[in-house]
Amino acid sequence: IFKLKNYQLIDSKNNFSKISIKDEFNLIFFDLDPKFIPKKLVFFLKKISSFKAKLVSIDGLMNFTSILDLIFIPSFNLKLKKNYKSKAKIVYGWDSYIINNKKKKNWKIGNTILVLTGGGDIDGLGKSWPKLFEKILPIGTKIIWVSGPFAKKINTPNNKRIYFKEYRAPKNLNNLINRANYAVTYYGVSFFELLYANIPTVTFPAKKHKNKLNRELNLIKSFNLSEVATDKNQAIKLLMKLIKDNKRASNISTNARIMLKVSGLNKLEREIKKLI
C-alpha cells in the first residue's frame, strides 16, 4: 500500500513493558489476535501515546479506544452501544474484509465447483462428500477440493464420472476461486473471499460453532448473498438446487457484487491516508 522508508517489526511474544522504540515513525500498526492480547501491552500503549505516530489496530484492541487513532474491524456484525464514545475511529462493514484478490469477474454458468474445507475439516467432509458427489452430481462436473494442512486424508472418488482434484494447503487460493462457477464452504474468512469474487456459494457453520454464528448467517441469508445451510447435510441439498437454478445463482452473484464493492485492503488504505 505504501512505500516504506523505515520500519520496525515487533513480535507479539515479546515483553511489551521492555520494548524499545523511537519516536520516529508516522504509523504504529497493531495486528494482534483478539484472543491472545499480550499482558504488558497496556504499558507499551501508554508509552507511545505521546508519540507523533498514529496508532492503528486491526481486528481488536477495543479496550484501548482512548489511546488508538483507528480500529479497523473485518466484520459486518459489530455491535456498539448507541452512546459508545471512542477517541479512535472505528471502521467496519461488508467491505472491510482484508481480501487480496484483484480479479472481480462476472459470473458464468459452468460445471466447476470449489469445495473449501477449512484448516482441519472439523466435520469430516472428506470422509463422505467425495463419494457422494460421485453419485449425485451431473456427469462431467469438475470438483476443486481444497484441504487444509490439518485435514485427514479424503476418500477420493475412483471412477471417471466426475473430475476430482484435491489441493492441499495451496499457496494461491485466489487462482482456484477465480476458476470456480459455484462453491461450498464452511463459514469463515474464505467465504468472504468467495463473495468478493462473486461466486454463487453455499455456506454452513461447523457443528461446534453452529449456535454462536446464527445471527451472522441469518443476516447473510436475509441479504441473499449466499445459500445458507444449517449443517453439512443441508449444504449438499442446497448446492444441488443452486447448480440447477441459473437465475438464483446469478442473483446471488449480483447481490455479492453490490454489497462487497471494494476490498477491505483498499478501504484500509484510504483510512490510513486520512490519518497521515
Image (cartoon, rainbow, N blue to C red):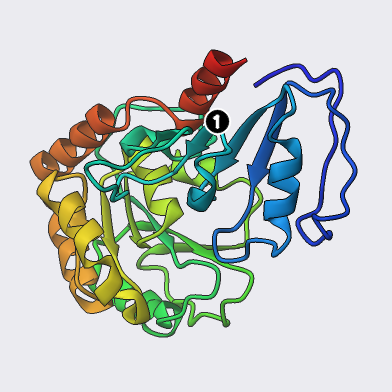
- Disc 1 residue crowd, few under 14, some 14–19, many 20+, Cα 10 Å: many
Of 61 and 93, the residue lying toward us = 61
Q: Which residue is mark 1?
A: 69
> Where does the C terminus fall, quadrant-wise?
top right
User: Residue 23, percent across and down?
Assistant: 83, 27
184 versus 235 height, above or below? above
Tell me the residue at 41%/34% (across/down).
91
> Where does the N terminus fall, quadrant-wise?
top right
100 versus 151 height, above or below? above
Locate residue 22: give its quadrant.
top right
User: Residue 139, percent across and down?
Assistant: 28, 61
Tell me the residue at 28%/66% (across/down).
213
Badge 1 element: loop
In the displayed structure, does residue 2 sit left or right of residue 257? right
Tell me the residue at 64%/70% (across/down).
149
User: Residue 47, percent across and down?
Assistant: 76, 41
Does the rendering let one see residue 22? Answer: yes
User: Residue 180, percent across and down?
Assistant: 39, 45
The amino acid marked with disc number 1 is Asp
